[in-house]
Image (spheres, helix red, strand yellow):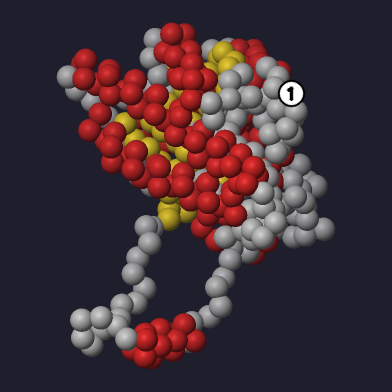
Amino acid sequence: MPLPDHLPLDGLSAIVTGAGRGLGRAEALELARLGAAVVVNDHGRPGRDGSGEASAGPAEEVAAEIRAAGGRAVAHLGDVADHEQARALVELAVTTYGKLDVLVNNAGILRDRMIFSMTEEEWDTVIRVHLKGHFNTTRFAAAHWRERSKAAGSPVYGRIVNTSSEAFLAGSAGQPNYAAAKGGIVGLTTSTALALAKYGVTANVICPRARTRMTEDVFAGFQEPADGTLDALAPEHVSPLVGYLASPAAAGVNGQLLVVHGGMVAVVERPRVAARFDAAKEAFTFAELDGALTPYYADRPPNETFAAAEVLGLKRE
């Protein structure tokens, strides 16, 4: 893609976790294209379930790609789910570039299983990498911005972009661990947004759809375009939104959840009350609840989940 007329992230530094492949790679390249100096973090394990030997290869390759295009980038191999390695990641950005301005949390793994078959280890591992990984990096980045703000006596520049999923919004039968972690990330983001606003920091969360190693099964039946046009599920549809949220232009966007894919961005409202029922006396009786709630749900259509083919305009093979 061509360079923009101006570089909105010029002079800023950024961390992107899970940036060796897929979405994270596209996001790191986009931030660099917009002028940011980037720390490319990836643990480098080959399995999407987090298995295999850690390798610096994926992170180093993306960092080299950024440098070859004229940008600035360093690689970091650490596991963001490890508290001390996350601390070292933030410290690397600060020591290399003088400060940290942008944190993009993207690292994740899958251990899919139905709830009645899932092991404790499968649950714990996914929660650890996704939710704890987001917390760890956020905790140290937040401390950095708070310290800088207190030293300056004024707000500083800080941006957090977290990664959730429509598995949290619509449910995903074979991913109770993943859906729970992604829901937790939304709660972490909104809490962080409130806590850090006075320091000049914003925190937002995206729900992306993209064809990556993580989603190869989900989108296996959707055709890629044969005419050379950009795949509606390409990660490059997601990365521009991350670049925008990382920029000064998004100063007024905070605590927001956005769904992004295929040339579309949807702003998701916080849950609203759909109906209210009041007890006739101090507390409900069973009969009252039965009389109010049973007809209410009987008149509502069955729960609907996101239909990817319909929304994206894709066709299965």
Amino acid at pointer 1 = Glu
Q: Is residue 162 above or below residue 75?
A: below
Q: Is residue 296 above or below residue 202?
A: below
Which residue appears at 64% of the width and 20% of the height?
59
The quadrant of the image that shows the N terminus is top right
Left or right: 124 as drawn, with respect to 289: right
Which residue appears at 60% of the width and 54% of the height?
176
Q: For residue 249, what is the image quadrant?
A: top left
Percent of width and height locating residue 298:
49, 86
Question: Circle 1 sits on which residue?
Answer: 53
Left or right: 44 as drawn, with respect to 73: right
Which residue appears at 55% of the width and 37% of the height?
128
Residue sitting farthest toward the left: 153
Percent of width and height locating residue 283:
25, 81
The quadrant of the image that shows the C terminus is bottom right
Percent of width and height locating residue 275:
34, 77
Foreground of the two, 189 or 99: 189
Foreground of the two, 274 or 5: 274
Residue 246 visible:
no
Q: For residue 117, what is the image quadrant?
A: bottom right
Q: Residues within 10 Å of mark 1 (few under 14, many from 20)?
A: few
Percent of width and height locating residue 188:
40, 42
State the SS at label 1: loop
Residue 100 visible:
yes
Q: Is residue 273 above or below residue 56?
A: below
Left or right: 59 as drawn, with respect to 295: right
Foreground of the two, 203 or 251: 203
- How many dots with numbers? 1
